[in-house]
Amino acid sequence: MSTKRIAGPEIEKLIQLLAKVPGLGPRSARRAALHMIKKKDQLMGPLAAALAEAVDKVTECSVCGNVDTVDPCSICTDPRRDDTTLIVVEDVSDLWALERAGAMNAKYHVLGGTLSPLDGIGPDDLNIKKLVDRIAEGGVSELILAVNATVEGQTTAHYITDQLSGFEVKVTRLAHGVPVGGELDYLDEGTLSAALRSRTNF
Amino acid sequence: MSTKRIAGPEIEKLIQLLAKVPGLGPRSARRAALHMIKKKDQLMGPLAAALAEAVDKVTECSVCGNVDTVDPCSICTDPRRDDTTLIVVEDVSDLWALERAGAMNAKYHVLGGTLSPLDGIGPDDLNIKKLVDRIAEGGVSELILAVNATVEGQTTAHYITDQLSGFEVKVTRLAHGVPVGGELDYLDEGTLSAALRSRTNF
């Protein structure tokens, strides 16, 4: 951006910060800033307040690694949830996706990433120790590894399985197959092979 | 989004507000919220403060319609700018674009939109009366109509020219032609015809 003062350092600073938000670049940050300036009362003010409130209140759950305004989080303390099943996810966004699907009423454990030696991310950088502790405490009968179907995700899944080999816990993973609504023509061979191998009775 | 409480009403509200920012949808708003929660000190806190400051300070310039933290804006009061040339733009974003180009050191007049009978936008809804007053005050020798090359933009340009027919002011418009770096093959016929008609000596 030009060093010429266009509209005051406050607006420039706002644009620079907005440009760091994922999904916005320098150009859309300017557009977003202008839109919000025009909608001060409906959007800009409430968003400033919501962000300030989130800065104050949002914290990481010390049990599962979820983000919430209470610690332990509202999922960990929910008495209606099944304590015996634990779903392991890479990130909070995966937890949110599974909650939106609403298929399970279990509890979670957020790893905070995947093992990635190339990026220097080892077991100690992830929330794995606490997972082993939770299993060691007992009470969990099934651990669902809902990690991404990537090399890093699968490596992490294998590592976790190794760590838990001494415990009496059933470890499962998400099924591979044709996405609901998906067209076979657009699917990769790996997915199709997996869907064939895991075929079910009609 | 599911009505199930995932991560507290504060985070849900933040996501809903972020989804209203142009450039972000419901999915990217969730991603943005999560990213900011992880970068509280570097991004979320400063952004909350910048937004709150902008809500407090940013105002519309009563002379030209620009947005700034002072009124009249810093462009209107800049003594190094040429007072005799006025660039008419539809929106503040156009003003910013021209300032980034840095080609002129003139002053501006922001219309706040274009005439659009279908959308019920007439001359009184735009900042046109104030433009005529500025011209009537004298001192402006050239008015550059930097409106978009759309039907609405050109209609607005014609209307403004009519309103100013009684004044001694030269009215000009932006040149049509091949964008710098543009390939002829990808240009529409209208632009190519205009570029041919307005050809210059090499």
Image (spheres, coloured by chain):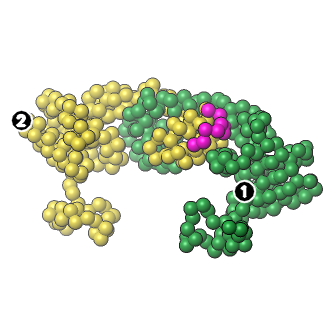
Chain colours: A green, B yellow
Which residue appears at 33% of the width and 64% of the height?
B181
Q: Give the numbered dot on residue A127.
A: none
**Quadrant housing residue B137:** top left
Q: Residue furthest right?
A: A166
- Along the horizontal axis of the image, is A189 left or right of B121? right
Residue at the location (20% across, 55% down)? B175
Q: Main secondary structure of the magenta part?
A: loop
Q: Which residues are magenta?
A: B1-9
Name the outermost residue toward the left. Answer: B166
Q: Is residue B20 placed above or below A121 in the rendered structure? A: above
Q: Is residue B120 left or right of residue B9?
A: left
Q: Position of residue B5 (x, y in %)?
A: 65, 37
Front one among B129 and A104:
A104
- Considering only vertical position in the picture, is A78 above or below B153? above
Chain bearing tag 1 is A
Is residue B135 inside the magenta stretch? Answer: no
Q: Amino acid at mark 1?
A: Val
Q: A119 left or right of B152?
A: right
For the C terminus of chain B, give its image quadrant.
bottom left
Please count the marks in the image: 2
Residue B6 magenta-highlighted = yes
Residue B166 numbered mark, or none: 2
The image quarter containing residue A52 is top right
